[in-house]
C-alpha cells in the first residue's frame, strides 16, 4: 500500500487520522516530541490507540474509554511494542499531540513539532524493538527536517511539566540518543 501522506515514514502502516491541520505559514518542523500511550492504561495490544486517533473509540468497551472517546487527538506515528510503526499524520501537517506546551520559551509545540507515541507507560521498560524502530524513524525524520537534531528531541514531560509525565523514567534517553550517532 502506498503512503497517502506527502511526508511518509518508510515501512510504516498508514492509518490517516482526521485529527490534524495546517501548520502556521512558513513553519517547518524543528522539534521531535516523544510520548507514551497505552489503552486501557497499562495494557498493550489491540486496536484501541488507533481507534482513539481515528475517532472510532467505542466507550462501551472499557470504563476508561468513556472519559476519552470524544477527544480529538493524534500523533504523527505510533511505535507498538513489537516495533511496528503506524503513521497517522503526514509529517508536514500539524498533529494534535502536545496540547498546552512550551519548548525553550516557544509556545504551542504542535505548530513546529513531530509527535511520536510509544506504546507503553512511564514505568514499564520499552522494548528493544521499539528502540530500534524509534531510532530508524528518528533518523529518517532528521533527513526530512535537518533542524531536528538530538538537542531538539524532547519528551512530552519536558514541554508540559506538571501536566504530562511521558515518556517517563522507564525511557532510556541516553541509549536512544546514543543510538542516533551509531551507524
Image (spheres, helix red, strand yellow):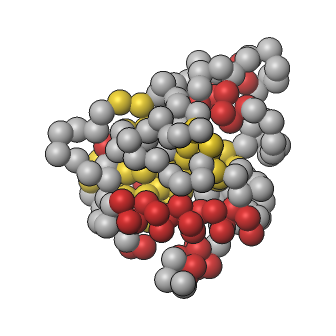
Q: Choose between 17 and 106: the one closer to the eye.
A: 17
Q: Identify which residue is drawn at 74% across, 37% down.
A: 39
Above or below, 12 relative to 59? below
In the image, taking residue 128 as reference, residue 179 lies left or right, namely left
| Residue 75 shows in this picture | no
The quadrant of the picture occupied by the N terminus is top right
In the image, taking residue 127 as reference, residue 102 lies left or right, namely left
Q: Choose between 151 and 15: the one closer to the eye.
A: 15
Q: Identify which residue is drawn at 63% across, 50% down.
A: 85
| Residue 2 shows in this picture | yes
The quadrant of the picture occupied by the C terminus is bottom right
Question: x and y percent of residue 31 in the render?
Answer: 37, 58
Q: Identify which residue is drawn at 66% across, 67% down.
A: 131
**Farthest top residue in view:** 60
Question: x and y percent of residue 142 in the render?
Answer: 40, 65
Q: Choose between 90 and 175: the one closer to the eye.
A: 90
Residue 179, quarter of picture: bottom right
In the image, taking residue 16 as reference, residue 83 lies left or right, namely right
**Farthest left residue in view:** 26
In the image, taking residue 128 as reference, residue 163 lies left or right, namely left
Amino acid at each position: 500500500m502506498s503512503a497517502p501522506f506527502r511526508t511518509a515514514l518508510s515501512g510504516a502502516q498508514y492509518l490517516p487520522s482526521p485529527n490534524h491541520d495546517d501548520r502556521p505559514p512558513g513553519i517547518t518542523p524543528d522539534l521531535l516530541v516523544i510520548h507514551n500511550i497505552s489503552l486501557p492504561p497499562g495494557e498493550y495490544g489491540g486496536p484501541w490507540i488507533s481507534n482513539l486517533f481515528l475517532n472510532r473509540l467505542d466507550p462501551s468497551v472499557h470504563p476508561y474509554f468513556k472519559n476519552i472517546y470524544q477527544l480529538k487527538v493524534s500523533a504523527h506515528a505510533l511505535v507498538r511494542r513489537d516495533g511496528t510503526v503506524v503513521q497517522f499524520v503526514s509529517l508536514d501537517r500539524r498533529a494534535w499531540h502536545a496540547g498546552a506546551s512550551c519548548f525553550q520559551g516557544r509556545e504551542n509545540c504542535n505548530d513546529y513539532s513531530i509527535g511520536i507515541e510509544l506504546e507503553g507507560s512511564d514505568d514499564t521498560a520499552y522494548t528493544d524493538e521499539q528502540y530500534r524502530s524509534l531510532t530508524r524513524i528518528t533518523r529518517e525524520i532528521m533527513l526530512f527536517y535537518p533542524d531536528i537534531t538530538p538537542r531538539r528531541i524532547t519528551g512530552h514531560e519536558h514541554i508540559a511539566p506538571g501536566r504530562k509525565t511521558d515518556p517517563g523514567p522507564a525511557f532510556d534517553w541516553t541509549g536512544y540518543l546514543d543510538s542516533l550517532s551509531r551507524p
